[in-house]
Amino acid sequence: MSPDQKRLAAGLMRVNHAGEMAAQALYQGQSLTARDPKLADKLKYASIEEADHLNWCRNRLEELDERPSLLDPLWYAGSFAIGMAAGIAGDRWNLGFLAETEHQVVRHLDNHLDRLPENDVRSRAIVEQMKIDEQGHAELAENLGAAELPQPIKQFMKLTSKVMTNLAEKV
């Protein structure tokens, strides 16, 4: 890859790593406050899959001679609190938050696939597999009875994600 392509790929993989750091915390917070023990177990299992994604992104950053976002502790703490709040709201809202989060992540990953250099086969493969897994998490949440979130909450989630992705790509 050219230096510009490598820089672009690294920035996008840094964003993905930050997103997976946030996903870890989100699922952990949600599983702690879920009322149904079976749901808590499913959220813990999803967290394990997210750990795989986190490791793939970290390894890819190392391959690109780059580092994760310096703001990862912030992403983790904020997402953990949000996850706990979603769980406290009740299991249907918890699942609704999970489904909406994953739908937004899938759209975000589609955008990364559009932006990643065509010759960056390794990053593209990671993002494509993450997209499949995230779509599966959204479908699981919906199948378990996710509530449809109100539009203002969806918009707030989208705005928060935009701030995070813009910062994580550079910092």
Image (cartoon, rainbow, N blue to C red):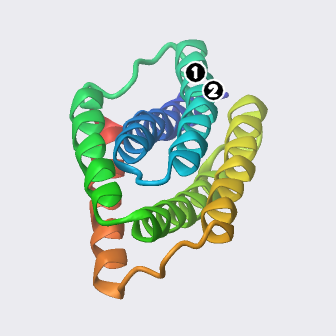
Percent position (x, y) of residue 68?
39, 23
Above-or-below relation of 36 to 57: below
Q: Is residue 14 left or right of residue 108?
A: left
Q: Which mark identifies residue 32?
A: none
Position of residue 154 measured from the top left corner of the image (x, y, whole percent): 37, 76
Q: Quadrant of the N terminus?
A: top right
- Residue appearing at x 23%, y 36% in the figure: 77
Q: CA distance from mark 1 to mark 2?
A: 5 Å
Q: Which residue is mark 1?
A: 55
136 relative to 159 in the view: left or right = right
Q: Which mark is residue 52?
A: 2
Q: Nearer the viewer, residue 149 or 119?
A: 149
- Quick one: 78 or 65, which is closer to the camera? 78
Task: Give the image quarter of residue 90.
Answer: bottom left
Q: Are marks 1 and 2 in contact (CB under 8 Å)?
A: yes
Along the line of sight, which residue is nearer the eye, 21 or 137? 137
53 or 62, which lies in front? 53
The quarter in which the C terminus is drawn is top left
